[in-house]
Image (cartoon, rainbow, N blue to C red):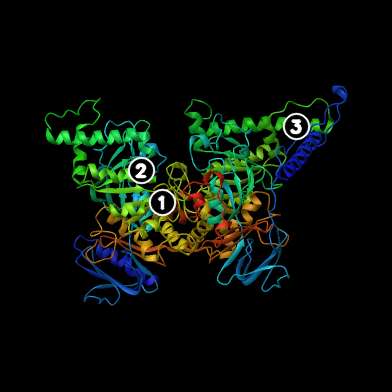
């Protein structure tokens, strides 16, 4: 029986791939001059490793008597949320439970959308952090736009389970490291263990391109006497690469429109072409304000937009410029002073961005920090209050939900508790902006995948099975 | 709050003078002593001549005392950062400023970090404003399992940061030790035993002991530095994580009975907690480490500290094994999390008083210094922080910090930056003129 099912799904997958291949690379039938145009975006497959994520079964559920932050700034005290068939159905003060619904009394508890971490290396730099598992950064050349973070994701990383159980993380972006100017493609995952990376992949989420400015690229390559060794070298290599990408895009656009001989494929340039076409979002590691300003001008020069600067410890110095460029900043609450370009980090970074009307969000970049992003937001909010910037709790929660969802291009599907969106929900055992609070239950697409009161609903990755820690469930 | 701040600055002016015979009473606040006891509502803290006179409920304000009203606030022992490089680095990633490790030095155990401590380091000012008043500062290893001698410092805004120089020797005996020793744990133990044997050789016959050649396995100064370790007059901090490594370290006492061991890291400590407790060896633990980050930490769990404490182990927490980029004052958040998990079924946490002790008296106790620092018990150095709320809560921050009874400046470089950019645009002049 098992074999049969496996075989059937495999067959289905194979035929899907075959279809994709047919659609993507229509074989030339006649002579070169008369090869037909494949059509815009159809010169090659754009999704060769498609998501096989499956929504697990969930019961229609009503959580009531609970404080709700809806993830878009809205708050309902003593409210209720109903979800069914994997989707949010309704929020309100009082809701009637459908006959078949599980009803949970949330008195004294909070409900929020699941936490979204836009900057993680889980799976790529998994635990245990041994050399054999160090797959997060193809630091062999300053431009490695051809690598895809998803091809390094180890779906057995114990960190996924910790991020779920302790942090209420339901969606996360896995990025390549920052040694390169062009680090490669990111991938967005649902935080649901699977046997394969494809099984975790967020269906339909756009890819990101990881870029980096500042100390890392110039240090890593400069120390090998390779360009870039300076910040000006960083920008020079960036511009040369974008110029090449513009040309690559023109060739492929023309071919897809007019037909003829297909241009040579360049896997790295595919990704940059995707950026220039607006399909792939730029996620740019950058610390210093002045460098971010240069990068935004460079983006205009070549016709793309930086979706978000990551780390951005000096974003507060240019909050107005970020806002004018419609570029977000994904930051830590309080990391500072660990290297020269982070020397000016301050705890008010997020609050100052919010005050200026710029788009900010929290991020972890850390397998421990991802377990406490709600706490990081609480610290950032409190720093703001001490500086006279009063950001209400429900609004601060946007830094964990709708803002990262927007910067990942998935805000139409998750990132807030709007009817019809994915039921990615956390029930917290108290105020989630308190240090004394932890997730009690986490649903992803309406499926209960963590329950603090039920040890069977705490995941244990293959690596931990039979080991003394065993997923920290003992 | 305005009134308190006002009186605090007046007090700072008074206390900053060398003669400080004033008695100060901080009244009306919730008092957190730091010795493991629970917070006391409407308590009083009295300090005089840089020491705590009394703290708790029902304490009379001495006649003539300067009174600070802390009603609605918390008055707590200053945090003691359990294991840091504070004052040794301006930023870890700025190699030129980093004195934590000497990769190519011929010396190891004899390294003494005290002369390198820079009380003006930006991080000291920021962390002081964050509520850290003392810190254990340790070197990191270079070419040996021995890192050298760490110190206890205060974070006061003055020229004399050292509370105790040469307070402990630090040694690596887990994976890091294996690497330092040339590639294996057995090699690390060989290096340890040889160094201690040579220290004894040196004691027996200093004149006949070489140790001045580049090729000497143990330099003369390093041998000298290990004698107080052998005698148990200087604690030996040992970084290990794995349960079996912990057992091996505890077993060293059979061969070197006077050793005064302190374990650092200890992520698998819960598995051998009764043995650690029976050996009366204190622990400075990685606070919340719950990932199998290495093969020596496969059993890591957030419950580690709670379980060791329950077993009777004197357990402090630290940023060992964690990212230190948030600064050492993140310790209060870690302690808060240990309270949080007490409510999670299946987890073992701490109560509030126990958790606060892990960042105040317990690190002091690990060094045998809890009679001098780390709590508001009578006679201790008056390291006191007035908080605007529960110190372990995320939203709380210090309003005033006293070190040795002296009110400290609260304006850090980070606050200067914040104020400069409260509006990002330039005004009538460039930002460089705004200060």
Question: Dividing the picture into quarters, in which one does residue A17 lie?
Answer: top right
Secondary structure, mark 1, is loop
Observer-side mark, 3 or 1, equals 1
Kindly report the distance in space between the C-alpha atoms of the residues bearing marks 3 and 2.
61 Å
Looking at the rendered structure, which numbered label has been put on residue B327?
1
Q: Residue at x 49, y 40 (%)?
A: A129
Pointer 2 indicates a residue of which chain?
B
Pointer 1 indicates a residue of which chain?
B
- The percent position of residue A427, horizontal first and vertical second, equals 59, 63
Looking at the image, is mark 2 or mark 1 earlier in the sequence? 2
Residue placed most toward the observer, A323 or B31:
B31
Question: Dividing the picture into quarters, in which one does residue B62 lie?
Answer: bottom left
Instruction: Count neighbours of disc 3 (C-alpha within 10 A) and say few if under 14, some if 14 to 19, many if 20 or more.
Output: few
For disc 3, the marked residue is: A250
Kindly report the distance in space between the C-alpha atoms of the residues bearing marks 2 and 1.
29 Å
- The percent position of residue A154, horizontal first and vertical second, equals 58, 41
Residue placed most toward the observer, A174 or A302:
A174
Residue placed most toward the observer, B205 or A1:
A1
For disc 2, the marked residue is: B245
**Number of marks in the rendered image:** 3
Looking at the rendered structure, which numbered label has been put on residue B220?
none
- The percent position of residue A240, horizontal first and vertical second, equals 62, 30
Instruction: Count neighbours of disc 1 (C-alpha within 10 A) and say few if under 14, some if 14 to 19, many if 20 or more.
Output: many
Callouts 2 and 1 on one subunit: yes
Reply above or below: A34 against B72: above
Question: Dividing the picture into quarters, in which one does residue A458 lie?
Answer: bottom right
Residue placed most toward the observer, A393 or B196:
B196
Pointer 3 indicates a residue of which chain?
A
């Amino acid at each position: 029986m098992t074999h049969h099912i496996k075989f059937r799904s495999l067959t289905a997958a194979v035929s899907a791939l075959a279809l994709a291949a047919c659609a993507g690379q229509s074989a030339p039938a006649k002579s070169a001059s008369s090869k037909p145009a494949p059509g815009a975006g159809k010169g090659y497959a754009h999704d060769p490793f498609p998501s096989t994520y499956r929504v697990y079964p969930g019961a229609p559920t009503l959580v009531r008597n609970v404080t709700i932050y809806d993830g878009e700034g809205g708050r309902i005290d003593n409210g209720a949320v109903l979800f069914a068939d994997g989707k949010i159905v309704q929020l309100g003060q009082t809701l009637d439970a459908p006959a078949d619904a599980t009803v949970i009394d949330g008195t004294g508890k909070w409900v929020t959308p699941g936490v979204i971490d836009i900057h993680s290396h889980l799976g790529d730099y998994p635990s245990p952090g041994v050399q054999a598992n160090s797959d997060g950064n193809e630091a062999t050349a300053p431009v490695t736009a051809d690598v895809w973070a998803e091809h390094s994701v180890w779906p057995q990383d114990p960190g996924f389970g910790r991020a779920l159980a302790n942090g209420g993380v339901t969606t996360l972006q896995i990025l390549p490291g920052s040694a390169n100017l062009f680090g490669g493609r990111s991938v967005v995952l649902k935080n649901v263990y699977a046997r394969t990376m494809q099984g975790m992949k967020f269906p339909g989420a756009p890819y990101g391109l990881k870029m980096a400015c500042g100390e890392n690229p110039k240090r890593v390559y400069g120390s090998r006497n390779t360009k870039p060794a300076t910040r000006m070298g960083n920008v020079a290599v960036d511009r040369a690469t974008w110029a090449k990408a513009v040309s690559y895009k023109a060739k492929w656009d023309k071919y897809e429109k007019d037909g003829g001989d297909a241009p040579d494929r360049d896997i790295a340039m595919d990704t940059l072409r995707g950026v220039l076409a607006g399909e792939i979002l730029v996620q740019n590691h950058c610390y210093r304000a002045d460098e971010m300003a240069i990068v935004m001008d460079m983006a205009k020069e070549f016709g793309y937009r930086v979706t978000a600067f990551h780390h951005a410890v000096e974003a507060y110095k240019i909050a107005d410029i970020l806002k004018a460029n419609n570029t977000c900043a994904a930051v830590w609450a309080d990391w500072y002073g660990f290297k020269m370009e982070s020397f000016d980090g301050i705890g008010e970074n997020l609050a100052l961005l919010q005050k200026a009307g710029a788009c900010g969000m929290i991020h972890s970049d850390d397998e421990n920090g991802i377990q406490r992003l709600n706490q990081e937001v609480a610290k950032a909010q409190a720093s703001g209050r001490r500086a006279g910037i009063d950001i209400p709790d429900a609004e601060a929660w946007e830094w964990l939900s709708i803002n990262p969802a927007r910067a990942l291009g998935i805000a139409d599907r998750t990132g807030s508790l709007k009817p019809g969106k994915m039921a990615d929900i956390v029930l917290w055992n108290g105020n989630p902006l308190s240090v004394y609070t932890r997730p009690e239950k986490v649903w992803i697409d309406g499926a209960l995948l963590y329950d603090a009161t039920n040890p069977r609903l705490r995941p244990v990755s293959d690596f931990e099975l039979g080991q003394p820690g065993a997923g920290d469930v003992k | 709050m305005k009134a308190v701040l006002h009186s605090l600055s007046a007090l700072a002016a008074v206390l900053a003078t060398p003669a400080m015979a004033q008695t100060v009473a901080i009244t009306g606040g919730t008092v957190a002593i730091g010795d493991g006891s629970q917070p006391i509502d409407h308590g009083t803290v009295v300090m005089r001549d840089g020491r705590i006179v009394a703290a708790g409920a029902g304490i009379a304000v001495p006649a003539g005392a300067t009174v600070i009203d802390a009603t609605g606030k918390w008055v707590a022992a200053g945090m003691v950062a359990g294991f840091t490089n504070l004052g040794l680095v301006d930023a870890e990633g700025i190699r030129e400023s980093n004195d934590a490790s000497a990769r190519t030095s011929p010396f190891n155990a004899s390294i003494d970090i005290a002369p390198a401590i820079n009380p003006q380091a930006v991080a000291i000012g920021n962390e002081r404003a964050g509520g850290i008043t003392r810190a254990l500062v340790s070197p990191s290893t270079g070419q040996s399992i021995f890192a050298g001698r760490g110190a206890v410092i205060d974070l006061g805004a003055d020229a004399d940061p050292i509370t105790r120089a040469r307070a402990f020797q630090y040694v690596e005996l887990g994976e890091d030790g294996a690497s330092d020793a040339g590639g294996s744990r057995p090699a690390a133990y060989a290096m340890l035993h040889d160094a201690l044997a040579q220290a004894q050789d040196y004691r027996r016959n200093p004149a006949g002991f070489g140790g001045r050649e580049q090729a000497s396995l143990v330099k003369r100064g390093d041998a000298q530095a290990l004698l107080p370790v052998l005698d148990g007059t200087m604690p030996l901090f040992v970084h290990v994580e794995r349960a079996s490594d912990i057992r091996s370290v505890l077993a060293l006492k059979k061969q070197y009975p006077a050793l005064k061991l302190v374990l650092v890291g200890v992520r698998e400590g819960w598995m051998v907690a009764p043995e650690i407790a029976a050996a009366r060896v204190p622990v400075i633990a990685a606070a919340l480490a719950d990932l199998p980050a290495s093969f020596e930490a496969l059993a890591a769990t957030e419950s580690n500290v709670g379980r060791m404490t329950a077993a009777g182990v004197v357990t402090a927490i630290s940023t060992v094994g964690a990212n230190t980029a948030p600064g050492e004052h993140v310790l209060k958040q870690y302690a808060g999390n240990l309270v949080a998990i007490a409510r999670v079924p299946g987890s073992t946490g701490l109560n509030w008083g126990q958790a606060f002790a892990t960042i105040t008296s317990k690190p002091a106790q690990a060094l045998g210094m809890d009679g001098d620092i780390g709590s508001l018990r009578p006679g201790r150095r008056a390291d006191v922080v007035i908080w605007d709320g529960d110190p372990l809560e995320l939203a709380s921050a210090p309003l005033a910090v006293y070190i040795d009874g002296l009110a400290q400046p609260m304006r850090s470089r980070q606050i200067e930056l914040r104020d400069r950019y409260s509006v990002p645009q330039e005004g009538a002049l460039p930002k460089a003129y705004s200060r």
